[in-house]
Amino acid sequence: MKFEEKKEVFNSFQDLKERSISYSRINYEYPASVQRGKILARELHPSGNGYVLGKYMSADVVKSNGYSVDSRGWISISNFTREELINVINNAMMSMSGKATKS
């Protein structure tokens, strides 16, 4: 997926707020988060790379979806399809809102 397509997917979630950061990158905040942080996605870049927060997802959700969560708790979305991106955003929102996520 290209940058504009990924932005379109993120912007289709009414609960997310787009915030421009340096070097043409975008963060997406989830104001309803009950977790420590509000940033659901960070550094969405025109190259198509970016990261979605996975550190609050259960091990079952991470495993069943094949997510690779780095040591800081982020999932790279550079090669995600539209469906995979929608799924990871939904899972991140559920985990940040303190609700149980489905695998």
Image (cartoon, grey):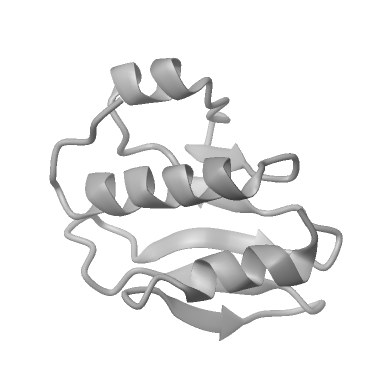
Q: Residue at x 21, y 69 (%)?
A: 32
Q: Residue furthest right?
A: 47
Position of residue 45 measured from the top left corner of the image (x, y, whole percent):
77, 65
Quadrant of the rendered image containing residue 50: bottom right
- Vertical arrangement, residue 90 with respect to residue 63, above or below: below
Position of residue 73 measured from the top left corner of the image (x, y, whole percent):
47, 37
Position of residue 25 measured from the top left corner of the image (x, y, whole percent):
72, 73
Q: Which residue is drawn at 55% across and 82% down?
A: 19
Q: Which of 59 and 15 is in front in this view?
A: 15
Q: Which residue is drawn at 58% across and 61% down?
A: 42
Q: Quadrant of the C terminus?
A: top left
Q: In this view, does 41 lie to the left or right of 81?
A: left
Q: In this view, does 40 lie to the left or right of 48?
A: left
- Vertical arrangement, residue 38 with respect to residue 48, above or below: below
Quadrant of the rendered image containing residue 70: top right
Q: In this view, does 97 lie to the left or right of 92?
A: left
- Vertical arrangement, residue 33 with respect to residue 73, above or below: below
Q: Which of 12 and 57 is in front in this view?
A: 12
Q: Which residue is drawn at 25% across and 44% down?
A: 95
Q: Which residue lies furthest to the front in this view?
A: 83
Q: How many marks?
A: 0
Position of residue 28 measured from the top left corner of the image (x, y, whole percent):
49, 70
